[in-house]
Amino acid sequence: MNKRFGFVSLILVLVIAVGIMAWKVLLSDTDVANTPKTARVTNQANDASDTDPSAGWQRITSSQNGFSLRVPDGWVITTYNGDDQIRSNDIDYIKGKPAVIEEAAYPYSGDASIRFGLYKTIQIDSNLNAEYSWDQTNFSIGNLRGTKYTRVISSDWEGCCTYPNTEEFIYEFKKGESIIYVTYNIYKYNGTRNQFSDSMTHDDDNQTALIEKVISTLEIN
């Protein structure tokens, strides 16, 4: 009798345990079903942003639809009407601060010395060679394949549109007859020789990793 009672009790305990587990699963499914779709999408977007910061950056398209790319938080970018070109001197990454997109009619000579630039053309830059002290390497990131050019301007440079000791980077990508050039300059504090001397108190930080992250978002049309 005691053995039979013990067996029945064991069966009852198992049935109750299985019932509790099934009830918890049912409640969990109900919570997911009742979660607003927008909330789930927002959570997915936040997860993507945590994994890849560029996923939350604003995407812009050049005025002639020649290319598009994502602009990091904190940047101030100028686009030019009638020209597949963008430029910026404000390229400090500030997470959570939306990028500012400005428009101008066309680039002017005062824009020549900029920290970041991107333009589409059909003309090859014939100055990108050893004669002008450029080193070149193959460069690839994401789906892009191209060439990376680098040089450092000498300390006794006395020319226009650049400054002594500037580190210059140019990335070249070709698609059909079109060529995309991405330029990045790291300026050094050179007193009155530098047009940024009034606002610069030290050398620019090296942000090639950020620049190349921006390049990875580039889509050439």
Image: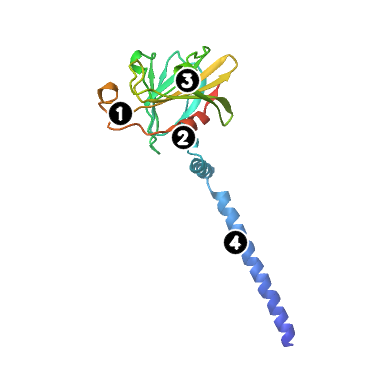
Q: Are marks 1 and 4 in contact (CB under 8 Å)?
A: no
Q: Residue at label 1?
A: 189
- Mark 2 or 4, nearer chain start: 4
Observer-side mark, 3 or 4, equals: 3
Q: Is residue 128 visible in the rendered structure shown here?
A: no
Q: Residue at label 2?
A: 209
Q: Are marks 3 and 2 in contact (CB under 8 Å)?
A: no
Residue 76 place in picture, x, y as percent? 37, 27
In the image, is 89 to the left or to the right of 30? left
- Mark 3 or 4, nearer chain start: 4
SS at mark 3 in the image = loop
Look at label 3 and name its amino acid: Ser
Observer-side mark, 3 or 2, equals: 2
Q: Residue at 29% of width from left, 25% of height from top?
A: 196
Q: Are marks 3 and 1 in contact (CB under 8 Å)?
A: no
Residue 119 place in picture, x, y as percent? 47, 18
Look at label 4 and name its amino acid: Lys
